[in-house]
């Protein structure tokens, strides 16, 4: 009788549970995450704010042999130097004003597990010396104490700044950087993985629909185009916030451009950004062709679906340009006010 062998992971670059995205940049992240999770090495997560560094840190922990042990997160940028030192290493009674009892630090709490040090670039040089010792020797003392505590804690750190540059300018210790940088993983900004935006939008729509008991089931093609053209300085977190806002504020079952901030739709920039420079007749032809190509071969009612949505969008945007003054909007549209009022009711824009 032979002993069954574990199945071979034939595709380590497949998406991780709970993380959305299949772009080449993200597949590299998945591959590195699975490889490093099996080791005991320190990991340095690099990338802009909002790219999902905490999700990857969780994934490394969950795929490791420490999965059933504690996962402790510390935002190093949220606390002052003294408070952060006490938070990380603990303190004894009387160590400083307000220390009325002994306290266990986060490193000790993460013993046999993982500690995630977010925004480690914000720590002081004094604290970095102590962090280096923990990484190298796996030991420390609580604030105000002389007793050495030994721990078995894996360290995952994250930075939203260029650590080599920080080190060269004297704001971050080079020896600590090299000790953390055993396995670096760079998380790409959202603007470098635009193919993942539709899947992310769909995921956040489902999540916030369920959370708010809404049913925004359709995404206007122009809204999706605006989302994919935007440069996303706040990355996935910014996208998530905008989708939540659209679900909460939307009057119907469709995510339309007017539910997105002006900075996304381009109302505060030249209107042609991301769109070809064509006349209205050609633009209408492009929109109709795109609408028909998106429909299945068996789908009927295309006239109402395409013309109705274009009509709704024209009315919504003209109303916005006219500050919701119906007399001005009716004149701009070339229809009488009663017709406009009827159309507003039909499209749920009143």
Image (cartoon, rainbow, N blue to C red):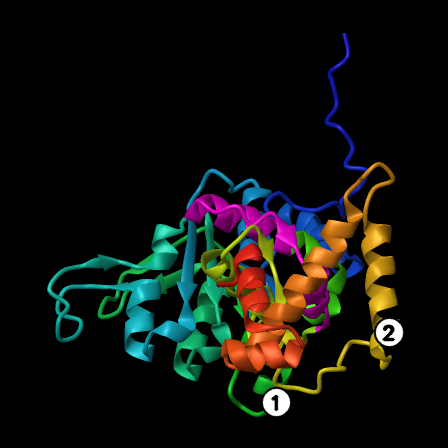
1 or 2: mark nearer the eye: 2
* Label whose residue precedes the other's in the sequence (1 or 2): 1
Please check the rendered image and state whether residue 216 is part of the magenta-colored stretch, yes or no. Answer: yes
Residue at 62 percent across and 67 percent down: it is 257
Give the residue at mark 1.
Answer: 168
The region drawn magenta spans 201-229
Q: Marks 1 and 2, how far apart in space?
A: 57 Å
Majority secondary structure of magenta residues: helix
Observer-nearest of 201 and 177: 201
Observer-nearest of 183 and 347: 347
Q: Position of residue 204 (x, y in %)?
A: 56, 53
List the single residue furthest toward the top.
1
Residue at 79 percent across and 48 percent down: it is 302
Tell me, for residue 106, which label it has, or none. Answer: none
Observer-nearest of 265 and 194: 265
Label 2 residue SS: helix
User: Dividing the picture into quarters, in which one does residue 187 lie?
Assistant: bottom right
Label 1 residue SS: helix
Give the residue at mark 2.
Answer: 281
Please check the rendered image and state whether residue 13 is part of the magenta-colored stretch, yes or no. Answer: no
Q: Is residue 60 visible?
A: no
Q: Position of residue 228 (x, y in %)?
A: 71, 67
Observer-nearest of 68 and 25: 25
């Amino acid at each position: 009788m032979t002993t069954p062998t574990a199945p071979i992971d034939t595709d380590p670059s497949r998406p991780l549970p709970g993380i959305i995205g299949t772009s080449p940049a993200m597949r590299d992240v998945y591959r590195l995450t699975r490889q490093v999770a099996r080791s005991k090495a320190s990991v340095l997560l690099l990338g802009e704010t909002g790219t999902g560094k905490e999700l990857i840190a969780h994934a490394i922990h969950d795929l490791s042999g420490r999965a059933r042990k504690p996962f402790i997160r510390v935002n190093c940028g949220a606390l002052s130097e003294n408070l952060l030192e006490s938070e990380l290493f603990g303190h004894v009674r009387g160590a400083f004003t307000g220390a009325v009892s002994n306290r266990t630090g986060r490193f000790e709490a993460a013993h046999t597990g993982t500690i995630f040090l977010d925004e480690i670039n914000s720590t002081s040089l004094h604290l970095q010396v102590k962090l280096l010792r923990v990484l190298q020797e796996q030991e420390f003392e609580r604030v105000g104490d002389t007793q050495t505590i030994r721990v078995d804690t894996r360290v995952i750190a994250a930075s939203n700044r260029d650590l080599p540059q920080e080190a060269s300018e004297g704001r971050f210790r080079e020896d600590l950087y090299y000790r953390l940088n055993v396995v670096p993983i760079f998380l790409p900004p959202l603007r470098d993985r635009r193919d993942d935006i539709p899947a992310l939008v769909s995921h956040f729509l489902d999540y916030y629909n369920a959370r708010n008991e809404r049913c925004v089931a359709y995404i206007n093609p122009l809204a999706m185009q605006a989302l994919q053209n935007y440069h996303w300085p706040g990355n996935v977190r910014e996208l998530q916030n905008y989708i939540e806002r659209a679900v909460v504020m939307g009057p119907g079952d469709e995510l339309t451009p007017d539910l997105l901030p002006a900075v996304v739709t381009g109302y505060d920039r030249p209107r042609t950004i991301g769109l070809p420079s064509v006349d209205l007749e050609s633009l209408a032809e492009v929109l109709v062709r795109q609408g028909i190509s998106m429909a299945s071969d068996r789908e009927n009612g295309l006239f109402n679906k395409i013309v109705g949505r274009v009509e709704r969008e024209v009315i919504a945007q003209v109303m916005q340009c006219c500050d919701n003054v119906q007399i001005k909007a009716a004149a701009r549209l070339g229809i009488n006010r009663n017709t406009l009022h009827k159309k507003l009711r039909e499209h749920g824009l009143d």
